[in-house]
Image (cartoon, rainbow, N blue to C red):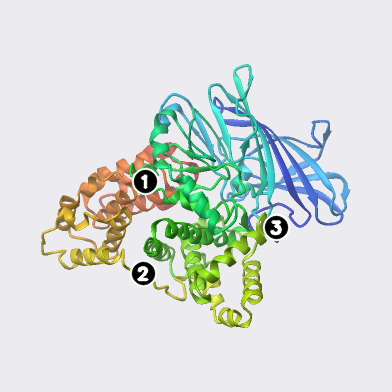
């Protein structure tokens, strides 16, 4: 593996990719992509004799020097690794010196086992008329979409020509070159270009029966036709989020900010693919109460996409910063108490994951060591929420927003288009604070427990204090239920009449922290608040977890319904685990998953199999 990145085979110390061009034909009948990738690489060392690329479950049909199929090159595939795939080792015709360019053309096709791709039959889509394909390349699945240097330390531009069967439309994480496709027989050819450098995990493709609606001067929302009006209404505030991000940081660099609402099997809340954010349909609450996920993905336009971690050990540089900017946007638009309240919800998520992994588990370090570890196995709220809490702590320590917000802008300006390590981030923080404020801020930074924050497992070394004006009523109501768990009290819909969605979630989360509730108390809670009938995905999720903790069997049908109508891992994995933990529900959990395995995205299915010990 590379000395720069423990999760790639690529010889990054010898050469790096500058541009990648894809020419692919989408074959729904055989569920494969067939075509070529042309990589433009620049050497960064002397006597470079080979190119090593990452692949996973790809069929390689030939490797060539240049842009055509005339000069074939010798190559061989290394031994397969279940997580990292196989190294594609390409011998160069002669050694190259430093700073030389070479173009390598690889002819290949994907297979049914490529983890980046999910192929949906028409009946698995909303409209049930046409097949559908979407990709998910984060963290290390780009290598199962195309041979590449699959490391966030390498930032590339890319272009693509995608041949799709009519009447389907292709979209990518890039700008469309041709608004109307070229018609070639029964095919449509769409062309794309991404001119801003990105890491390989941000290459994205979707092909389906897609319709678009403009929701702002630089934004269109895309979905299947029957959903488009609902999607357009839900995400109408997108431009406001973008403008707030620009005000906090720098001008938006990507041209377009479009949204794609995917079929329900999409495994994440959102994926920050540039120019085309992917989002789950579970955000369609009908009241815009869950669209803060879009603020998170927009924040990625700067943190993660423009300024990028150099490897997955420093993933918090993407996600901790993005949570920090997301909550800054929330604070600007909804008031500082909303930002503070969101942070408190985040601490609950962090505590739950630290409890799940174990307080001494090295994967709960902000900077975990991932040699030989699939980054997906380390995935949790730790880089998000521990990272946020670290930045919030530093902001308070250094003098608040007046000091920290100008630093944020300068940080983005300095590292835009680059990948960096935690040490580089820390070094820049020191240099910036010294140049602006002198020894005063340096002495404060020297007091920081850097080892405790960055390299020690468990909860953060310091517990931040947050404003409790929005959480106080939630805590009081939860305490009331805990105190009266065995002695009925007059619960009423008025208890939560003025609660926001987030306050309802906070209340349920507080109750979840107590001992399992008696079934009579759950009956009373449901009768008063109508929680089983709520369609908001977040409230539904917390309520079902609360019931499963008490092995409350009347909720089982609702849990199965929720598990089989969406595949978002935030919901599916904890619910399957909780159902499986119930003696009366363990077989139901396994049977439900086995029956619906093909519905879930390959990434999601792999983890649920582990959770259910299958």
Tell me the residue at 56%/49% (across/down): 138
| Helix, strand or loop under label 2 | loop
Whether residue 336 sits left or right of residue 116 in the image: it is left
Tell me the residue at 56%/39% (across/down): 113
| Helix, strand or loop under label 3 | loop
Could one spot residue 148 in this view of the protein?
Answer: no
| Helix, strand or loop under label 1 | loop
Cβ atoms under marks 1 and 2 closer than 8 Å: no
Could one spot residue 124 in this view of the protein?
Answer: yes
What residue sits right under mark 1 in the picture? 288
Circle nearer the N terminus (1, 2)? 1
What residue sits right under mark 3 in the picture? 2
Q: Quadrant of residue 519?
A: bottom left
What residue sits right under mark 2 in the picture? 467
Circle nearer the N terminus (3, 1)? 3
Image coordinates for residue 544, horizontal then vertical, percent = 28, 51
| Mark 3 or 2, closer to the camera | 2
């Amino acid at each position: 593996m590379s000395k720069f990145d423990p999760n790639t085979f690529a010889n990054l110390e010898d050469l790096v990719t500058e541009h990648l061009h894809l020419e692919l034909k989408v074959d729904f009948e055989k569920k494969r992509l067939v075509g070529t990738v042309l990589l433009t690489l620049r050497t960064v060392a002397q006597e470079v004799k080979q190119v090593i690329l990452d692949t996973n479950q790809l069929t390689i049909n030939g490797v060539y020097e240049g842009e055509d199929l005339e000069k074939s090159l010798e190559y061989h595939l290394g031994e397969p690794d279940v997580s990292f795939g196989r190294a594609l080792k390409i011998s160069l015709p002669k050694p190259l010196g430093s700073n030389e360019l070479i173009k390598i053309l690889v002819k290949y096709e994907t297979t049914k086992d490529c983890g980046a791709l999910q192929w949906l039959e028409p009946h698995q889509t909303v409209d049930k008329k046409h097949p559908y394909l979407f990709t998910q390349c984060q963290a290390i699945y780009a290598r199962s979409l195309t041979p590449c240097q699959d490391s966030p330390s390498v930032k590339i531009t890319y272009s693509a020509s995608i041949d799709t069967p009519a009447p389907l439309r292709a979209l990518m994480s890039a700008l469309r070159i041709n608004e109307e496709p070229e018609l070639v027989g029964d095919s449509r050819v769409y062309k794309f270009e991404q001119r801003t450098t990105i890491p390989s995990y941000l290459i994205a493709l979707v092909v389906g029966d897609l319709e678009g609606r403009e929701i702002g001067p630089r934004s269109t929302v895309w979905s299947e036709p029957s959903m488009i009006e609902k999607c357009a209404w839900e995400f109408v505030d997108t431009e406001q989020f973008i403008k707030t991000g620009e005000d906090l940081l720098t001008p938006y660099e990507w041209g377009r900010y479009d949204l794609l609402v995917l079929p329900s099997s999409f495994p994440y809340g959102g994926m920050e693919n540039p120019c085309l954010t992917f989002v789950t349909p579970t955000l369609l609450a009908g009241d815009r109460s869950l669209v803060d996920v879009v603020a998170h993905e927009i924040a990625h336009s700067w943190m993660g996409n423009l300024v990028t971690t150099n490897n997955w050990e420093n993933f918090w540089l993407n996600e901790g910063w993005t949570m920090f900017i997301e909550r800054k946007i929330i604070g600007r638009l909804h008031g500082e108490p909303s930002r503070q309240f969101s942070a408190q919800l985040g601490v609950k998520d962090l505590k739950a994951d630290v409890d799940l992994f174990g307080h001494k588990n090295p994967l709960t370090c902000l900077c975990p060591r991932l040699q030989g570890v699939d980054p997906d196995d380390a995935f949790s709220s730790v880089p998000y929420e521990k990272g946020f809490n670290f930045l919030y702590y530093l902001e308070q320590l250094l003098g608040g927003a007046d000091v920290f917000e100008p630093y944020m802008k300068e940080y983005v300006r300095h590292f835009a288009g680059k990948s960096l390590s935690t040490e580089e981030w820390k070094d820049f923080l020191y240099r910036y604070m010294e140049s602006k404020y002198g020894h005063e801020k340096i002495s404060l930074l020297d007091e920081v427990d850097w080892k405790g924050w960055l390299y020690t497992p468990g909860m953060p070394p310091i517990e931040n204090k947050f404003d409790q004006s929005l959480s106080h009523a939630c805590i009081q109501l939860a305490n009331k239920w805990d105190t009266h768990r065995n002695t009925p009290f007059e619960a009423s819909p008025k208890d939560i009449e003025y609660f926001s969605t987030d306050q309802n979630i906070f209340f349920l989360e507080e109750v979840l922290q107590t001992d399992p509730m008696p079934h009579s108390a759950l009956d009373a809670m449901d009768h008063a608040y109508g929680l089983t009938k709520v369609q908001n995905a977040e409230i539904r999720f917390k309520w079902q977890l609360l019931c499963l903790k008490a092995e409350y069997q009347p909720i089982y049908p609702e849990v199965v319904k929720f598990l089989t109508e969406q595949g978002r891992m935030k919901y599916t994995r904890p619910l399957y685990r909780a159902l499986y933990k119930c003696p009366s529900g363990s077989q139901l959990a396994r049977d439900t998953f086995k029956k619906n395995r093909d519905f879930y995205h390959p990434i999601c299915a792999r983890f649920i199999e582990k959770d259910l010990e299958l």
